[in-house]
Amino acid sequence: MAGRSCENCTLCCKLLEVEPLEKPRAVWCPHCDQKHGCRIYERRPEACQSFYCGYRRIETIDDRWKPSKAKFLINYEEAENRIVVHVDPARPDAWRIEPYYSTIKQWSRRALADHGMVLVWTGSNATIVFPDRDKNLGQVRDDQYIVPVERMTPLGPQIDFEIADAP
């Protein structure tokens, strides 16, 4: 988006896992200067070079959604067909504050209709956002997957999600 930059924001350097650097989720990258940015900018991994958070890509959200203000960042993971909200563990309920929460619920409605999901990560804790509820899956290990399951309810079949171990 024209006019949007990372200026004064380094939250992705804390919230995202960076495999080439063996940096886990929700831990500050050792190469990050929180006030000035990446100290290895010219040599940073491809995962960092190609990443643009939702604030920089979604034109329907405003400056309140800048990660340094909102205390979370948004990412779309196309391969898994999911919108992911990575929340700063120091502010675990930041995503539940308005105007964020109702917008995230709208995204959930559209994602489910498209066989996708909205997933909130707070550290290694995962929450699935449904239009009518939030389902805390608890801690999810790196060797586990979040998979859709169809459950029969009095209202008919409904999609749910659960944790599965790698085969």
Image (tube, helix red, strand yellow):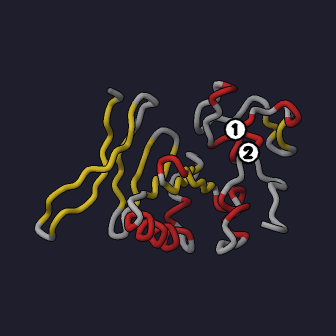
Asked whether, in this view, residue 3 is left or right of residue 149, the answer is right
User: Residue drawn at (69%, 35%), measured in percent from left and top?
Assistant: 28
Q: Amino acid at mark 1?
A: Ala
Where residue 61 sits: x, y (%)? 66, 72
Vertical order, 64 against 118 (above or below): below
Nearer the observer, 47 or 86: 47
Image quadrant in which you'd find residue 46: top right
Q: Amino acid at mark 2?
A: Ser
Vertical order, 13 against 24 (above or below): below
Asked whether, in this view, residue 40 is left or right of residue 145, the answer is right
Quickly name the residue at label 1: 47
Few, some or many C-alpha atoms within 10 Å of disc 2 (few <14, some 14-19, many ≥20)?
few
Asked whether, in this view, residue 90 is left or right of residue 137, the answer is right
Few, some or many C-alpha atoms within 10 Å of disc 1 (few <14, some 14-19, many ≥20)?
few
Position of the C terminus, as image quadrant, is top left
Where residue 140 sits: x, y (%)? 41, 36
Where residue 158 sits: x, y (%)? 23, 62
Nearer the observer, 115 or 69: 115
Position of the N terminus, as image quadrant, is bottom right
Quickly name the residue at label 2: 50
User: Residue drawn at (64%, 61%), measured in percent from left and top?
Assistant: 70
Helix, strand, or loop for circle 1?
A: helix
Nearer the observer, 109 or 13: 109
User: Residue drawn at (68%, 54%), measured in percent from left and top?
Assistant: 53
Distance from label 2 to label 1 (Cα)?
A: 6 Å
User: Residue drawn at (72%, 56%), measured in percent from left and top?
Assistant: 68
Nearer the observer, 160 or 78: 78
Asked if the residue under mark 1 is in contact with the one under mark 2, i.e. CB atoms within 8 Å, the reply is yes
Vertical order, 109 against 71 (above or below): below
Helix, strand, or loop for circle 2?
A: loop
Where residue 90 sits: x, y (%)? 58, 47
